[in-house]
Image (tube, coloured by chain):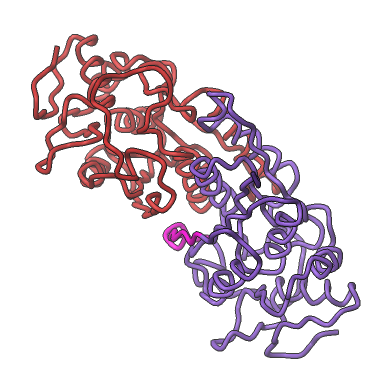
Chain colours: A purple, B red
């Protein structure tokens, strides 16, 4: 029997590559997305369509209102910075977001009888978020193996897979292309135009454009401004 | 300045005692409750009223739909067992619930600038849930100190307080009474009647009644059946 895996899936470049990698490793991917009060629903629409195109067994959309907590440009009406990727943790950091996402993934994994959870974090070409680091992922895996029914009953061991964590953005893109990912269907922009064009200037767009540039490829996404180097 | 603390608060016996203890320790309590698709909203109404009566600075209700994940008698329409507290993990276990609750508490703590989170789990007179054990709480504290902005910036260290974890239910009740908790305002039943009377037969009612009995007190809660020993 194919082993089930829960794949955290935003519909963006990283998580789409991560989904393709889970499938290539022989898992049956169950994709999980969150409507968490982010500024736009475009990435969720893309996630819904793309999850099935990428061969996910099912796609679960969970609604959680992180706006009540606030504290981030992505949820609290603070302007998304466009001046370039700087030092430190930017205002787009959403407090405890990956911990919340992984917790839901763990709950769903328990119900599905899955012991493998995929998350598309990477710690090289990234925004400096604390919850993207390898030591954080390792700590969540330890937690998962204490938090759950299986931990008490000894029926299995959870693994948190972060296959992109040591890859550059260019390496992620090359890997995805080799697995047949259509990046024109992935959305990465933090602040797209009303008709869904990427801004080209937020951290997420800049990291993506830099990745395609370093991979020697053109980004098939549609941008408002064409400052592709 | 009084230090802020986030207190996970269901309105039940344990979390109400926990809130009173946080306040007695000198913290400014910020109470957080979840509407998670549990079978009844009675405990949430009680939580809202009681949080302010207990001196919480504010009360945040977060809606999350755990019914989409399912896997528990409390969220998935499975009957709540009434035969008594047995061995093993019962069907009322909600997959990853405390991990999800603590994750949201961590996010809110980051925004509030709080480094203390209180959770009213106990590991003696309890239902055998894996996410109520001391090693689980310790693992979440480790995670919290890797997951967050403060972990990277070195501005503080999170503490997960579980002050009830080593107490019997009778000890919890005595402690709460000494701190002025009015237990007639707390709701513990998994399956109350439509007008809010406790069933007296689910695990939660049985543990509560046993606690009051061992503490030599009458439970001021209102029950459908009067099988108080």
Residue sitting at x 50%, y 30%: A149
Image vertical order of residue B65 relative to residue B105, above or below: below
Residue A161, image x, y percentages:
71, 47
In this view of the protein, which residue sits in the foreground, B102 or A106?
A106
Q: Is residue A64 magenta?
A: yes
The stretch of residues the image draws in magenta is A60-71
Residue B208 quadrant: top left
Residue A126, image x, y percentages:
76, 61
Residue sitting at x 35%, y 14%: B168
Left or right, residue B31 beside residue A58: left
Residue sitting at x 12%, y 35%: B197
Whether residue B229 is visible here, answered yes or no, is: yes
In this view of the protein, which residue sits in the foreground, B216 or B25?
B216
In this view of the protein, which residue sits in the foreground, A96 or A176?
A176
Q: Is residue B45 magenta?
A: no
Left or right, residue A41 beside residue B26: right
Left or right, residue A24 beside residue B197: right
Residue sitting at x 40%, y 49%: B66
Q: Quadrant of the C terminus of chain B?
A: top left
Image vertical order of residue B103 relative to residue A44, above or below: above
Residue A135, image x, y percentages:
74, 41
Residue A3, image x, y percentages:
65, 45
Whether residue B1 is visible here, answered yes or no, is: no
In this view of the protein, which residue sits in the foreground, B95 or A137?
B95
Image vertical order of residue A37 relative to residue A202, above or below: above
């Amino acid at each position: 029997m194919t082993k089930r895996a829960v794949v955290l899936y935003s519909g963006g470049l990283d998580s789409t590559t991560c989904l393709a990698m889970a499938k290539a490793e022989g898992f049956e991917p169950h994709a999980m997305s969150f409507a968490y009060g982010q500024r736009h629903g475009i990435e969720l629409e893309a996630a819904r369509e793309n999850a099935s195109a990428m061969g996910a067994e099912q796609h679960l959309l969970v609604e959680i209102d992180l706006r009540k907590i606030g504290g981030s440009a992505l949820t609290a009406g603070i302007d998304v910075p466009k001046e370039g990727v700087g030092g430190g943790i930017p205002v787009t950091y959403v407090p405890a977001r990956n911990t919340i996402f992984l917790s839901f993934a763990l709950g769903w994994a328990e119900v599905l009888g899955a012991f493998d959870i995929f998350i598309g974090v990477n710690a090289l070409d990234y925004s400096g978020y604390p919850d993207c680091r390898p030591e954080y992922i390792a700590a969540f895996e330890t937690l998962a193996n204490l938090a759950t029914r299986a931990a008490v009953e000894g029926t299995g061991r959870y693994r948190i897979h972060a296959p992109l964590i040591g890859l550059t953005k260019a390496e992620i893109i090359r890997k995805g292309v080799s697995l047949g990912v259509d990046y024109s269907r992935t959305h990465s922009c933090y602040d797209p135009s009303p008709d869904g064009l990427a801004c080209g200037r937020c951290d997420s767009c800049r990291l993506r454009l830099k990745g395609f540039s370093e991979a020697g490829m053109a980004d098939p996404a549609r941008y408002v401004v064409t400052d592709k180097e």
